[in-house]
Amino acid sequence: MTIPHSPENGPSDRTLVKRVRRGQGDAFNALVRRYLRPALAVAWEFTESRDDAEDIVQEAFSRALRGLQEFDEKRPFRPWFFTIVRNVGRNTAAWRSRWGYEPLSETLPSRGGDPLSDAERREVQERIDAGLDLLSPMQRTCFRLCDLEGFSGPEVAEMLGLEESTVRVHLHRARGGLRKALRPLREERGSA
Amino acid sequence: MSSLGSRLPEETGYWDELAGRITEDADPFLRESYARQGVWWSSLARGCPALVATALIATTVVALTLGGGVETATAATTSPVMQAIEPDDALARRFLAEESPPSVEIMLPLMNDSGRTQ
């Protein structure tokens, strides 16, 4: 799966960071486009609503921009940035829980096609969601980012600030848990 | 990998809009950063004041040292020249010593019969 707006070609992060510190807007735009998609994927793990996830991402980029003035250029940008995203996500989640904020429920976007396939897809989605609810938060996050959003194990490790081996373990357990949750559906279809 | 459960939008327009929103929000700060770069050494000054202070002191010392050296060198070159052109004639030395042009009366007693100075 290709990741739109995450071009790895072009100037290195370090070059872009130097240019952003000099106030060059095009360099900041390039950094935003490079990290927007994975940042939104991580942010969404802290909230139920896409709007909230977008706000988290926007706030994270804003903090990163201000923090870049003091940022040690010898350090890699990527883990530093994802730490900011996670911190903003945690703060937002804590705020929501403290004030009892409930985001608007979002309907599953239709992917077109006939109503029958939409209904079928919704059923599978509900089973997956039910299975995901049985997983630990970290297993769920690793499964979503790797298997549903298409990020690689090393990418997810960086996004979550974990060791790659830890991500693999969470992923393995998550897949096992989901397999159990989806078994009845498979059996129903097999007997039908 | 299944794309069934992906929540992230695939439309390019969505990402363009979100990126635009974030960069627009950052624009005032970036302009401010750019303005701060007006003086090329301001980032150095901000990053390491001690280094800049040392550089300024070093520059001052070098300037003073070079200035003194030039003066000494000028004196060293002009001194033999002055010596070479300094007259051994008493009258001429008196002329040079005077701040104003010499009067005729001063010159007369110093002349011998042939009209030459002594």
Image (cartoon, rainbow, N blue to C red):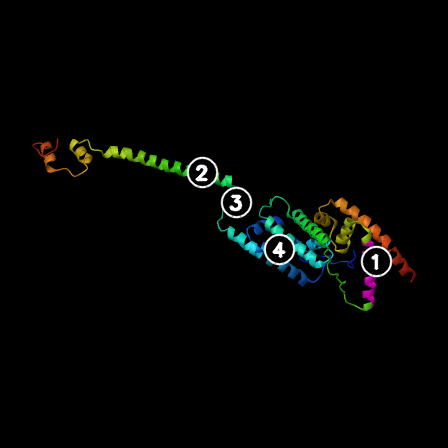
Disc 3 packing (10 Å; few <14; some 14–19; many ≥20):
few
What is the x, y in percent for residue B87?
A: 20, 33
Q: Secondary structure at mark 4?
A: helix
Marker disc for residue B46: 3
Disc 4 packing (10 Å; few <14; some 14–19; many ≥20):
many
Chain ID of residue with mark 4: A
Dot 2 corresponds to which residue?
B57
**Left or right: residue A52 compared with residue A19:** right
**Left or right: residue B59 compared with residue B13:** left
Distance of label 2 from label 1 (alpha carbons): 73 Å
**Left or right: residue A10 compared with residue A99:** left
Dot 1 corresponds to which residue?
A127
Disc 4 to disc 3: CB gap under 8 Å: no
**Left or right: residue A32 compared with residue B36:** right
What is the x, y in percent for residue A90?
A: 70, 50
Chain ID of residue with mark 2: B
Looking at the picture, tell me which residue is in the foreground, A78 or A47.
Answer: A47
Main SS class of the magenta portion in the image: helix
Region in magenta: A116-132
Disc 4 to disc 2: CB gap under 8 Å: no
> Considering only order in the chain, which callout, 1 or 4, is on the residue closer to the N terminus?
4
Q: Secondary structure at mark 3?
A: helix
Amino acid of disc 1:
Arg
Chain ID of residue with mark 1: A
Taking the view exactly as shown, the residue that stands out farthest to the right is A191
Disc 2 packing (10 Å; few <14; some 14–19; many ≥20):
few
Residue at 52 percent across and 46 percent down: it is B43
Do the residues at discs 3 and 2 belong to one chain? yes
Amino acid of disc 2:
Ile
Amino acid of disc 4:
Ala
Disc 3 to disc 2: CB gap under 8 Å: no
